[in-house]
Image (spheres, rainbow, N blue to C red):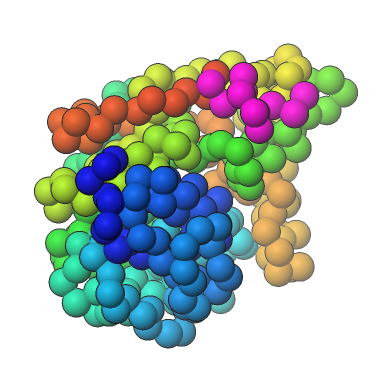
Amino acid sequence: MSGLRGLRVAVTGASGFCGSVVARAAAAAGAEVTCLGRRPGPVGGWREWDARRTSPDLTETDLVIHLAAAVGDPPPGRAAEAAFRAVNVDGTARLIDAAAGRPIVWVSSASVYATPSGSGAIREDHPLGGLTAYGRTKAAGERLALDAGAVVLRPRAVYGPGDPHLLPRLRRAVRAGRVLLPGPDIRLSLTAVENLADACLAARSWPSGAYNIADGEVYRRDEVAGLACGVPVRHVPLRLTHAAAAVATAVGRVRGTEAVLSRYAVEQLTVPLVLDISRAREQNWSPRRTFSDFVAGPGGSSV
């Protein structure tokens, strides 16, 4: 990534899990990094930006890597949809206006895809139709980004040191020395945060459009869960899981909090979803990290 030397790179969401890794990678590659967000990032300068309300300051910027997003799985409803739209759609519009034609790498998510109906790998032309407020508003935001000529990256289930989503969710499923998972084993794609960071830095030279970003391996869900938790896997009937998710979602709606187990979480663990990454590979990007690397290295499995 020596081509970044002297490049002035703005990284939004740089205080978050993915953004902090991208900001460090850009700095290590020689870029002059400015972190934009509500909190300072791990390297470089900081310009405060609330994506819900204000326009970012992108003066003296050569490249924008946009990772700031509203994430999570709140109970369905207008309030959640509006809160996610304020960041993922309206915030994107403000970012595009501020960029004023500067190149943008916009990090989306495989959550924008409609539920696959077959077993084949999903290409970038697969229909969109996010199940949650997050997926729907990311799809709407990336349409704005694509219309503006951005490069859009679609990772799935990003993991790595400090991961606040995938691994904690799996480890919460451990009961009596087993990790309880709904339904039968499935094939799925995951994305190491280092692979995503590599793509973010390389994508500045890619043609505008959407690109799936995932590890080179296709994983088995049960193997991943076993490695992450260090215990055997036990399958729970899907009907029981769906019933529990319905109850948890109803409780979350009453309390105004995220459900521990939601319909979206169940889908993530029960619907096979493999990403075709050939379009990104055609740009000479190649994923270098795997889940086994992560578990074996520092910051991997705590079990």
Q: Looking at the picture, does residue 59 appear above or below residue 30?
A: below
Q: Can residue 158 be seen in this view?
A: yes
In the image, 169: left or right of 280? right
x and y, in percent, of residue 276 in the image: 27, 29
Chain part drawn in magenta:
293-303
Tell me the quarter of the image containing the C terminus: top right
Q: Which residue lies furthest to the right in this view?
A: 176
- Can residue 143 be seen here? The reply is no
Q: Quick check: 177 left or right of 107?
A: right
- How far from the left and from the top, in percent, is residue 297? 61, 24
- The structure residue drawn at horizontal position 53% and vertical position 62%, both measured from the top left corner, is 41
In-image side of 167 versus 37 (left or right): right
29, 284: nearer the viewer: 29
Residue found at the very far bottom of the displayed protein? 54
Which residue is farthest left? 207
Residue at 24 percent of width and 79 percent of height? 97
Q: Tell me if residue 179 comes above or below residue 149 in the rendering.
A: above
Q: Is residue 296 magenta?
A: yes
Q: In this view, does 101 lie to the left or right of 127?
A: left
Closer to the camera in the image, 136 or 54: 54
Q: Residue 178: give x, y in percent of width and height.
A: 78, 20
Reply above or below: 246 against 216: below
Q: Residue drawn at (55%, 74%), measured in percent from left and top? A: 38
- Which of these two is toward me, 97 or 202? 202
Q: What is the total number of numbered labels drawn onto the structure image?
A: 0
Residue nearest the observer in this picture, 121 or 22: 22
Task: Assign the magenta stretch its main secondary structure.
Answer: loop
In reply to whether residue 282 is colored magenta, the answer given is no
Tell me the quarter of the image containing the N terminus: top left
Q: Where is residue 265 in the image (x, y as percent from the top left)?
A: 59, 43
Instruction: Tell me the residue at 28%/74% (across/down).
Output: 60
Q: Would you identify the image quadrant in which residue 168 lies? A: top right
